[in-house]
Amino acid sequence: MENGLKTASQAGEGTRAPRAAATLGARPERRIALLRPSQHKGPHAARSREGFLLTLPALVLLVISVVYPILWALNLSVHTFDVINPSRSGQFVGLANYVEILSSSDFRAAFLNTVAFVTATLTAELLIAFPIALLLHSGLRGTPIFRLIFSSPLMVAPVVGGMLWQFMFADQYGAINNVLAVIGVQGPLWLATVWGARAAVLIGNLWLAVPFDVLVLLAGMANLPEELFEAARIDGARGREVFRHIMLPLLRPALLIILVIRLTDAFRIFDLIYILTGGGPGGATKTMSIFTYEEIFTRLHFAQGSAASFIMLGITIILSIFTIRVMRSKEVSA
Amino acid sequence: MKRKTSQTILLYLLLIPLSLIMLFPFFWMITTSLKPEVDMFATPPVWIPNPPTLENYANVIFEGDFHSYLLNSLIVATVSTILGLVIGAPAAFGFARMPYRFSGILFLIIIAIRMFPPVSLVIPYFMGMRAVELIDRVPALIIAYLPLELPLVIWLLEGFFREFPKELQEAGEMDGLNALGILVRIAIPVSLPAIGVAAMFAFLVAWNEFIFALSLTRTPNAATMPVGIAGYVTNFRTFWGPMTAAASIYTIPVLIVTLFAQRGIVRGLLGGAIKA
């Protein structure tokens, strides 16, 4: 295990960014080197040709299964589409579908719900995962068992998570309000109220997502240079100062991985909400994925649904680039 | 560093309740699945079923559609994983060991596919599958899951093949092996643990996937477990006994894999950022 989680040592020491960060653009030197044309002839030219042939099946498959469908959907999003009356389909309308989506109050509400959810969950995840990771890093007896416990929901299907939390948030027979009753608290009507449902979605998602954050942070902490902390302690630095000025900067690569991966994941959340609240009550937990899905399969607005999905895609790309930029600029100034 | 006993106790007082919260949904899933129908809606709840019953499991296994959902999940995940490895492993080896012009940028584009919101592919897939009459048929999901699994497999194995010793590659070339020969005869046999991680990861992507399954299937003919569970939750939200039994059968193997192959899973999530 220890041996396995070497990432962050490299990350921490800043000698070599972890691969995830490198491919995401934090340390692109190696990638750029690959872009240079091969300067050697002979075996290298042969290798290049063979390399191309090895990657060809995957490239062809991804062009057919991703690039072509995306272009097709992009084309659909600037045309009319009528399921009932096909003769009305296929007229070019420019950006009209995009305008229709962007001006719909439903979409704007879903957009705001999504932004609020992403902000809330990322903040809460880190605030919860950081102390847990520190606890698991403090060398207590039984740490391996606790680590297993805190990683247990890691690969549970979000659908199952949604089902279990719906059951637990039920108001009469639900486990949560009954546990709260034991300690004398009257639980709210979770899934039937606007803020109760939002809190339920957040809690259900935290259960699914915190394990990932904890494990990435632990991987980062496992390889922090111990001497640095010793030196700081000898110099009389207090725990909080050590954490803020030594540990946190060294964990930046791990935090970058968490932010980029969790940001894009949280932004497209669908499964958990679909099962837990269905976007309700009254659209209070409707996110952009749920909105887009309804646009397609409930209202049968395929062209508008396409436009909505491209708006989502655009925002996802901008957010990822932004996160990487912010983390990199801090890295430089640190 | 020595810690005071009082400090140690305090740390445990934080860890233990947090652990119990983490485990509670699993505890509740399993105990509910072992409760008889009469205990299901008791207030206050029956915390420990007494006596436990396996009737919910019998219901799920011998009646209803859950065994079809489970079988569909198994078929879709297994076949798509095998295809993903057969196509993805050579690509990863090519990207890692035999770079060519633009291979770096192509690799980056493949990784970027992982960030796509899947809902943006739902419409073209739905329309395409309808056109070739694959809606509600198992091959549709196998086709839909390949582009989700391939980038993962390539990302993960590329990182691993990067560490493959240069000398072995050159020895293979001296022996007149072509790239595929080096991969199949030398690289794969020494990389079986990494291939196992990639396989597990691809399998879990298909096993847990929901939005494509929901869009492309309708009946037990092709629907997978997540769709089956979703149908029960949204249509008959009171069958908690059979539902938790089905969820247990579906989830416990994943839980065991997560616990025993934790290192591999973390590596998969980070796409080879962590070395084994």
Image: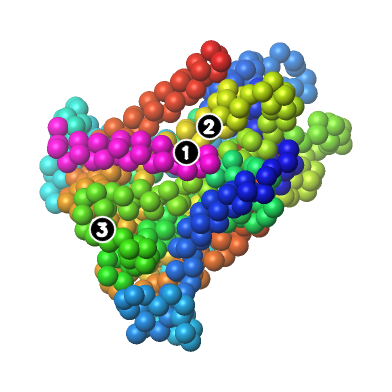
Q: Are the two marked residues, 1 and 2, in contact with CB atoms closer than 8 angstroms?
A: yes
Q: Secondary structure at mark 2?
A: helix
Tell me if residue A113 is in the magenta stretch: yes
Please tell me which residue is depicted at 28% across the width and 49% down the height of the picture. A198
In which image quadrant can residue A250 be found? top right
Q: Secondary structure at mark 1?
A: helix
Please tell me which residue is depicted at 35% across the width and 35% down the height of the picture. A119
Callout in the foreground (3, 1): 3
Instruction: Report the disc number at residue B239.
Output: none
Whether residue B113 is visible, yes or no, is no
Horizontal relation, residue A249 to residue A70: left or right: right
| Disc nearer the start of the sequence (1/2) | 1
Viewer-proximal residue among B120 and A285? A285
Q: Residues within 10 Å of mark 1 (few under 14, many from 20)?
A: many
Q: Chain of mark 3?
A: A
- For badge 2, the amino acid type reads Leu
Viewer-proximal residue among A103 and A44? A103
